[in-house]
Image (cartoon, coloured by chain):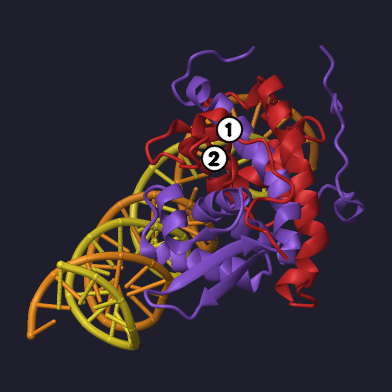
Chain colours: A red, B purple, C yellow, D orange
Amino acid sequence: MGMETAPHAAPLPQAFADGVFPAGCPSRTLLDHITSKWGVLILIALSEGDQRWSDLRRRAEGISEKMLAQTLKTLERDGLVSRRAQPVIPPRVDYSLTERGYELSALLVPLVAWAFDNAEDIINGVSQSK
Amino acid sequence: MGMETAPHAAPLPQAFADGVFPAGCPSRTLLDHITSKWGVLILIALSEGDQRWSDLRRRAEGISEKMLAQTLKTLERDGLVSRRAQPVIPPRVDYSLTERGYELSALLVPLVAWAFDNAEDIINGVSQSK
DNA sequence: ATGGTTACTTACTCTTGGGTCAGTACCTTA
DNA sequence: TAAGGTACTGACCCAAGAGTAAGTAACCAT
């Protein structure tokens, strides 16, 4: 079955029309942030609305406090997540997605959904479609 | 501006309707594979059609032979990439996406495109939307 | 005074992703 | 006969991501 060219050709940015992903490209860095082990989960969790620190810990099951702090800082620096601290005791901090963060999460959610739907089959090798 | 609930609510799988991403879940593993540093680039490259080993090396600029081999093996085991070796000298091996691989790449391409479009602004901190 | 709550930070360790480089197989061409 | 081309594998090592655990701040309730 001839598959020399892509059957459902997807619209890649013109920038790498030559098909090469340059090594120094800033998109590499950004991609590393948003596809990081915990970054994905945090972004997905926040796509459902504002969350407190403790909420995020619970949702991204297994994350350590160190990694949560580190991941949130990176995403905040990237302008994808915003932090609102309330001056109360005990402390209360709410995290949410920025406009840009929502834009991104709209693309991330279907990916995670797909992974969830296909994971069992794939990882436990149920069926390999030709 | 009330943002207590998600403004553009996205359709997350029912499975984690409680908003918790379980630690042992196989989707975590699959997600790690497809969002790995080199995994993304290989899948994107293959979304443009069949590629030889040497093509992939060129496209995923900076990848080492070791990592290319390792990444391809993982993706092949996951049933996302298929390998066709031709018994010629010098050797010729063609890699392509499986049905499932194409399904995935259709979700991955917009993500990478978005990263590409926003990387400069974000990484070099041009403008932080509110 | 003591313990509890929440959101962190810091120090230490360890696992693993990843780089480098040399080597292999096999035939062709100069 | 030596060099070249292609697709690898394997050994060795390093750095960065990630886990563990303890500590901090600040106030309130007991």
The crowd level at tag 2 (other Cα within 10 Å; few <14, some 14-19, many 20+) is many
Question: Label 1: which residue?
Answer: B115
Q: Is residue B53 left or right of residue B12?
A: left
Q: Amino acid at mark 2?
A: Leu
**Res B44 visible:** yes
- Relative vertical location of residue B72 with respect to residue B38 in this rendering, above or below: below
Q: Which residue is mark 2?
A: A31
| Camera-nearest residue between B14 and A27 | A27
> At which x and y percent is residue B71?
51, 64
Q: Residue at x 67, y 50 (%)?
A: A6
How many numbered marks are there? Answer: 2
Task: Say which quarter of the image contains residue B95.
Answer: bottom right
The picture places residue B102, in percent across and down from the top left corner, at 72, 54
Residue B75 against residue A83 in the figure, above or below: below
Residue B21 visible, this orientation: no
Q: Residue at x 66, y 69 (%)?
A: B78
Identify the image quadrant of residue D4.
Answer: bottom left
Q: Are marks 2 and 1 in contact (CB under 8 Å)?
A: yes
